[in-house]
Image (cartoon, rainbow, N blue to C red):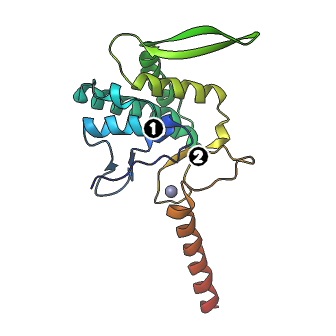
Amino acid sequence: MAEEFLFLGGDPSVDLVNTTFHRQSPGGADELLTSGERARRWFVQAGLLSEADATQLDEDTLLHGTRRMRAALDAVYRPLARRQPDEASTLRGLNVLNAVLGQGRERLEVTRQGEAFARASTFETLGPNDPNVQVARRAADLLHRLEPHRLKQCENPGCDLIFYDDSRNASRRWCSMEACGNQQKQARHRRHAAQKAAS
Ligand SMILES: [Zn+2]
């Protein structure tokens, strides 16, 4: 069975980056977007694509566009998450992000609500539907409100998942407590126990 997608990044644009991980692994990175069908499933599960629209998409185009978008987001997010600013990487990523954003437009609508008015906005794709436009929109929102210290890479040295820490005091350290937090706690516990035994 194909591996489950991870939605622990705090934002779909961060979750997309986490569809590949273990980049430093000698056996090569783990890839969750192994096909156009998998890319389609990712967008549906991320809530960025309806089942009905999903069936309309060309899978090869989608897979190519999604991996390109992912690489661009990684180029922007990763240096920030690792506290290793890289202006060239950031600008390279933004170029792709802006090119994709250029395929969408904001549509504003005013509706009557009782005695008042409400304004709603939707971001829609010009031309062929590409859900990467929606992920680009989410990235633009996140970057706009970004507090850089909240964008982090998991503290487990063997894990390269990133996340946006929305917790009140920005104290989150792990991609997930189950996967990495407990593992790191146990490792620390074992180290302490070994040190005690040795002393
Ligand atoms: Zn982790």
Which image quarter is the C terminus in?
bottom right
Secondary element type, mark 2: strand
**Ligand 1 lies under 8 Å from the Cβ of mark 2:** no
Residue 120, image x, y percentages: 61, 15
Q: Answer with the quarter of the image where residue 42 lies.
A: top left
What kind of element bears circle 1? loop
> Residue 23 at x, y = what percent?
38, 50
Q: Which residue is drawn at 33% across and 53% down?
A: 3
Foreground pick, 176 / 42 = 42
Report which residue position mark 2 lands on.
152
Above or below: residue 187 compared with residue 193: above
Separation of marks 1 and 2 at Cα, in angstroms: 20 Å
Q: Is residue 113 left or right of residue 164?
A: right
Mark 1 residue type: Ala
Q: Which residue is drawn at 52% across and 46% down?
A: 162
When asked about the image quadrant of residue 36, the answer is top left
In the rendered image, which residue does mark 1 sit on? 46
Q: Are there few (<14), some (14-19), or many (20+) residues within 10 Å of tag 1?
A: some
Residue under the point 60% across and 78% down: 189
Most extreme residue toward the front is 114
| Callout in the foreground (1, 2) | 1
Residue 145 in the image: x percent, y percent? Answer: 66, 28
Mark 1 and mark 2 lie on one chain; the one further toward the N terminus is 1
Q: In this view, does 43 lie above or below 165?
A: above
Quarter the N terminus occupies: bottom left
* Residue 181: percent from left, percent from top: 57, 63
